[in-house]
């Protein structure tokens, strides 16, 4: 029998052992107290969390890069548990997204009702495409939704870059200059502008002793310069206004001011519509007598906010129908929206002077239904992006853009994963858990319009549709995965449950290994 003193000593020893074990137990970055509130508005609580996440992100990324892509972070929670905890914290943010979706859907329904959309509009016109009431009504709906004078919505525009090119070539002339206000543009636009050389096939000798015709703005005699965004952005402090004013004042040939709303492949914040409105108002006030055309690349941003750039003063904008406004149903197409004379000029570039029409070939139903579904699918894409940021940023401390809890103006979620192998592993899981081409393993390669090797995971029903779940990224430092789209946020939950294990962030998974 133990004496009372021996019993007390044993209890003290057990407590000491327990405290020691707890002190040295691996602590995951996830905390239930890290509660993400609304993603639509800044929050003091989120600001503090953002600073902690940023600090942890730097340390986590340095650790990953030092240890290599095979490193498994010390985390006892299953991937499924981590994703479910993140979802619980995001409930208020998801509710905010649903409220915004409802407001935008109400506007869409109002425009459909005003245009008296009926089944008679589904049958497109062939040949020249004259008298297509469905096409004309669709363009009226787009103009109303975007608060603009006119809209050009055509299946003959086959990408966002094509739409942007038509708009720029429509309003620029030899001797003009375009000034970029948001820094370096998206990779595919560099060849349109002429800032990156188009590579000619060395075996192509079809035009010996002749200048290689690139078709760029630079070759056409249009100059280009750009002003970077401020290094540390904050509300009201995105654009370098003093440098913009200086360049406009110094060059009377500047005609077009280019703004790219989305971050593209750059590690910079996407630009909220309010900030675009602020810089436009500033320029109009400082240069009231200059004919300056403000063009906005609106790709990935449609229906994310209540307003679009044309609501706040943009003269002309462009985007793709296989991104947000197509609602995953549009089989192809693009749009150009803005002041009527600028839209007309872009249409002449798409077709030819004096030519009207444009056959829709029976696609009106898909363009109309896709537009109706767009607010809902964009809302789900936002939820999926929030989940990615919450898991990878708040959970594992990786640098995320946008950071968890910050304002969103597009559907893109960028995450620095630390190595080439992890980019490929993440994209592999996205492809494997996609409905189309799940048997394909994405590999890096050179793609037209991109300056570096790029990997794409696009297991989508519409080729290249980035409103459906997809991920991609250039294989260059800092090894960032750019993810976007989903028909429902739970699709990203499934991807994360697998990707966390395959990338070495979790030791185990609670999902079926045969899935």
Image (cartoon, rainbow, N blue to C red):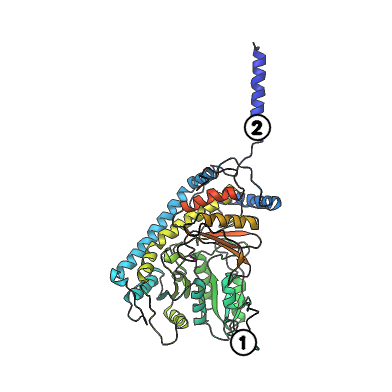
Instruction: Provide residue 436's location: percent of width, then percent of height.
Output: 48, 59
**What's the residue at 60%, 78% (across, down)?**
194
Picture quadrant of residue 428:
bottom right
300 within the magenta span: no
> What residue is pinned by disc 2?
21
Residue 105 seen in this snapshot: yes
Q: Is residue 43 visible?
A: no
- Against 515, residue 179 (above or below) is below
Foreground mark, 2 or 1?
1
- Whether residue 147 sits left or right of residue 282 in the image: it is left
Look at the numbered disc 2 and give the secondary structure of its residue. helix
44 vs 34, nearest the viewer = 34
Prevailing secondary structure class for the magenta stretch in the rendered image: loop
Report the span colored magenta.
461-465
* Earlier residue among tags 2 and 1: 2
> Percent position (x, y) of residue 99?
40, 55
Residue positioned most to the right: 66
Depth check, front residue: 35 or 465: 465
Residue 349, position in %: x, y? 47, 82
Task: Please give left or right for residue 52 compared with residue 161 in the image.
Answer: right
In the image: residue 156, left or right of residue 473: left
Q: Position of residue 285 (x, y in %)?
A: 52, 75
State the CA–CA distance, disc 2 to disc 1. Answer: 75 Å
Residue beneath the point at 64% across and 16% down: 7
Q: Nearer the viewer, residue 332 or 404?
A: 332
Q: Which mark is residue 207?
A: 1
Neighbours of disc 2 within 10 Å: few (<14), some (14-19), many (20+): few
Residue furthest toward the bottom? Answer: 209
Residue at (37, 71) in percent of width and height:
363
Which quarter of the image is occupied by the N terminus? top right
């Amino acid at each position: 029998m133990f004496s009372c003193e021996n019993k007390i000593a044993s209890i003290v020893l057990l407590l000491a052992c327990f405290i020691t074990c707890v002190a040295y137990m691996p602590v995951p970055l996830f905390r239930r107290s890290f509660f993400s509130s609304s993603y639509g508005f800044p929050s003091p609580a989120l600001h503090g969390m953002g600073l902690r996440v940023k600090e942890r992100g730097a340390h986590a990324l340095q650790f990953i890069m030092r240890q290599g892509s095979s490193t498994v972070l010390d985390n006892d929670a299953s991937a499924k548990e981590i994703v479910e905890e993140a979802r619980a914290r995001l409930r208020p943010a998801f509710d905010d997204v649903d409220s915004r979706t409802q407001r935008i859907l109400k506007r869409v329904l109002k425009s459909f009702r005003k245009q008296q959309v009926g089944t008679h509009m589904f049958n497109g016109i062939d040949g020249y495409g004259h008298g297509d009431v469905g096409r004309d009504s669709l363009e009226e709906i787009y103009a109303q939704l975007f608060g603009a004078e006119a809209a050009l919505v055509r299946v003959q525009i086959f990408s966002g870059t094509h739409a942007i090119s038509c708009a720029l070539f429509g309003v620029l002339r030899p001797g003009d200059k375009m000034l970029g206000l948001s820094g370096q543009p998206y990779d595919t636009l560099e060849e349109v502008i002429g800032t990156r050389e188009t590579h000619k096939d060395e075996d192509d000798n079809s035009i010996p002793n002749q200048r290689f015709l690139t078709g760029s703005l630079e070759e056409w005699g249009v100059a280009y310069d750009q002003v970077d965004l401020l290094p540390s952005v904050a509300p009201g402090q995105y654009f370098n206004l003093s440098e913009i004013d200086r360049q406009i004042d110094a060059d009377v040939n500047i005609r077009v001011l280019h703004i790219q709303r989305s971050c593209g492949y750059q590690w910079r914040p996407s630009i909220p519509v309010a900030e675009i409105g602020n810089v436009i108002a500033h320029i109009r006030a400082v240069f009231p007598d200059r004919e300056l055309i403000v063009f906005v690349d609106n790709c990935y941003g449609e229906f994310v906010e209540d307003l679009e750039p044309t609501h706040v003063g943009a003269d002309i904008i462009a985007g793709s129908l296989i991104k947000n406004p197509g609602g995953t149903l549009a089989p192809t197409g693009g749009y150009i929206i803005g002041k009527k004379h600028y839209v007309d000029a872009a249409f002449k570039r798409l077709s030819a002077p004096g030519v009207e029409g444009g056959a829709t070939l029976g696609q009106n139903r898909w363009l109309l239904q896709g537009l109706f579904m767009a607010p809902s699918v964009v809302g789900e894409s936002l939820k999926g992006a929030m989940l990615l940021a919450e898991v990878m940023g708040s959970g594992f401390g990786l640098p995320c853009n946008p950071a968890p809890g910050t304002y969103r103006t597009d559907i893109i979620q960028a995450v620095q994963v630390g190595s080439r192998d992890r980019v490929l592993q993440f994209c592999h899981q996205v492809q494997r858990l996609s409905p189309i081409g799940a048997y394909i393993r994405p590999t890096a390669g050179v793609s037209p319009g991109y300056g570096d090797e790029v990997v794409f995971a696009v297991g989508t029903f519409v080729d290249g549709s980035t409103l459906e779940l997809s991920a991609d990224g250039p294989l260059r430092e800092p090894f960032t995965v750019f993810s976007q789209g989903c028909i429902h946020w739970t699709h990203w939950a499934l991807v994360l449950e697998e990707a966390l294990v395959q990338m070495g962030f979790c030791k185990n998974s609670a999902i079926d290994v045969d899935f």
